[in-house]
Image (cartoon, coloured by chain):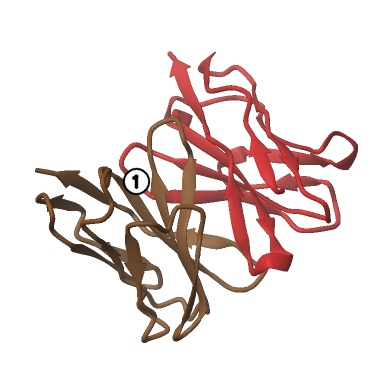
């Protein structure tokens, strides 16, 4: 069965520090992978996606993620965090063979300290 | 402006009452989805529809119903059978094997 694990429920970083949010997935075929960000009381905004090709993908707001098939991981990174990055981050895998059904992780809450 | 709209932003339900959440998209997407979000549980799929007049149950469909009479619209009804309806409800749309785009959400509260 498809699943997504985000092992870190909550992360605190200082403004200007680097960030890495972890995501591991379980899926039999080549996955479609996504990272979304959610501000309190809002919908989800797409940060970046991986379908195929280059395993390092760039997204909006200076985020990037690397697909590592051998580790079943799709970790999100940012070299220098801004206070406005404080939000909830969700990793998702798209099970394309079953009609574009998505499976979401439980999210990582990011706090940024000034 | 292209996008997904959800209404209302807040909805209050009385005991035994059915309530309907609206979701409209003008992105010309074939597929639409309803998710429920509870603290610490991520997003759970309630129903999804890949084409008009067709929809499938997701992981937590009990106590909910949907219809898809138009491509642009995918309303969700929370029935009285749903005993714990308090949550944040998110609607999304997308095309097959492509990104899902989300609406701003509706928060449902029980009086």
Residue that mark 1 sits on: A42
Above or below — where is B102 with respect to A58? below
Residue drawn at (22%, 48%) of the image: B108
Instruction: Farthest residue to the front: give it.
Output: B81
Q: Position of residue A95 (x, y in %)?
A: 69, 59
Residue drawn at (49%, 24%) of the image: A110
Which of the 4 quarters of the picture holds residue A94? bottom right
**How many C-alpha atoms fall within 10 Å of the one at disc 1: few (<14), some, or many (≥20)?**
some
Q: Position of residue B54 (x, y in %)?
A: 48, 81
Q: Position of residue B43 (x, y in %)?
A: 47, 45
Q: Chain of mark 1?
A: A
Which quadrant of the figure contains the C terminus of chain A? top left
Above or below — where is A112 with respect to A22? above
Which chain appears red?
Answer: A
Question: In the picture provided, is A28 more to the left or to the right than B77?
Answer: right
Question: In the picture provided, is B75 more to the left or to the right than A63?
Answer: left
């Amino acid at each position: 069965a498809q699943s997504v694990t985000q092992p870190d429920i909550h992360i605190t970083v200082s403004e200007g520090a680097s960030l890495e949010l972890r995501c591991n997935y379980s899926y039999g075929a080549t996955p479609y992978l996504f990272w979304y960000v959610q501000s309190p009381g809002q919908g989800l905004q797409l940060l970046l996606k991986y379908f195929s090709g280059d395993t390092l993908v760039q997204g909006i707001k200076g985020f990037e993620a690397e697909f590592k098939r051998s580790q079943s991981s799709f970790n999100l990174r940012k070299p220098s965090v801004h206070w406005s990055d404080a939000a909830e981050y969700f990793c998702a895998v798209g099970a394309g063979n079953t009609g574009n059904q998505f499976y979401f992780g439980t999210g990582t809450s990011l706090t940024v300290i000034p | 402006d292209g996008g997904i709209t959800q209404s209302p932003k807040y909805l209050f339900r009385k005991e035994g009452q059915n309530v309907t959440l609206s979701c409209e998209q003008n992105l010309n997407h074939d597929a639409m989805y309803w998710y429920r979000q509870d603290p610490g549980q991520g997003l759970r799929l309630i129903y999804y529809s890949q084409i008009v007049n067709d929809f499938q149950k997701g992981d937590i469909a009990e106590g909910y119903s949907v219809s898809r009479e138009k491509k642009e619209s995918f309303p969700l009804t929370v029935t009285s059978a749903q005993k714990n309806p308090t949550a944040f409800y998110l609607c999304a749309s997308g095309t097959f094997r492509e990104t899902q785009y989300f609406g701003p959400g509706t928060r449902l509260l029980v009086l």
